[in-house]
Amino acid sequence: SQQGEEDPQALSIQEGENATMNCSYKTSINNLQWYRQNSGRGLVHLILIRSNEREKHSGRLRVTLDTSKKSSSLLITASRAADTASYFCATDTGANSKLTFGKGITLSVRP
Amino acid sequence: KAGVTQTPRYLIKTRGQQVTLSCSPISGHRSVSWYQQTPGQGLQFLFEYFSETQRNKGNFPGRFSGRQFSNSRSEMNVSTLELGDSALYLCASSIIAGETQYFGPGTRLLVL
């Protein structure tokens, strides 16, 4: 079963614009991780945010976590064509490394 | 450090056969997890190993099994393959539970 639900399912923006993706989940978590996947290849880890953190930054990425609403958002600033990929949020309840993934968001960045 | 490696990268099998996939984690990582990715079901957790012990298993039939060796390398096996087993199988490693999981490139299995 999938715990995470990403929103929107697909997003198309112009290069240079910001992209915001949302994720909601159902149960208490230990951490939430965001991943990127290009064309059915392996997942690339973007950022991990723990349940006691509210915001984290990494380069052009900004992730927020609201445990009271059981939701997270990923912001990619100044997007590039190379950011075109599928993005997944995954929740970790802390029980033996089991990640539960959402269905993913397809981001298209037009040059 | 070298990343997670998976072999083979591509595999074609026929129904009824069995297959073994291999995963080498990042050096020093003791936890290895396996996931199946299909267009219909998305990414689903198969199982997780730590120090040669299976600690967690997803909701998959007994045809799916795995093991971990003393050097933390892991294998998963699927017996009596079905068409629905066609998928991208991803392996991930982490130092311990609750930390970042790093994924390999995956093995794409096609069952004919």
Image: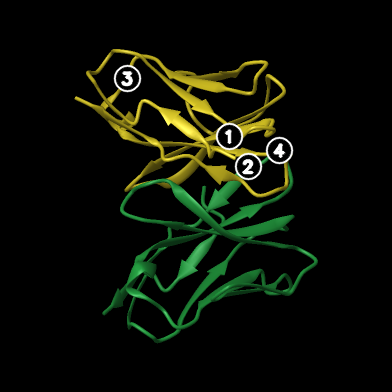
Chain colours: A green, B yellow
Proximity of marks 2 and 1: CB atoms separated by less than 8 Å: yes
Report which quarter residue A19 is drawn in. Answer: bottom left
Q: Position of residue B43 (x, y in %)?
A: 45, 46
Q: Which residue is mark 2?
A: A98
The amino acid type, in three-letter code, at marker 2 is Lys
Q: Which residue is mark 4?
A: A96
- Residue A52 appearing in the image: yes
SS for callout 2: loop
Proximity of marks 4 and 3: CB atoms separated by less than 8 Å: no
Q: Which residue is mark 3?
A: B81
Q: Residue at x 36, y 47 (%)?
A: A41
**For the residues marked 2 and 1, what is the alpha-carbon distance in whole angstroms?**
8 Å
Chain letter for mark 2: A
Q: Position of residue B77 (x, y in %)?
A: 45, 18
Q: Using the image as rendered, state which of residue B52 and residue A6 is in the foreground.
A: B52
**Position of B102 compared to B70: left or right?**
left
Q: Position of residue A63 (x, y in %)?
A: 62, 73
SS for callout 1: strand
Chain letter for mark 4: A
Proximity of marks 3 and 1: CB atoms separated by less than 8 Å: no
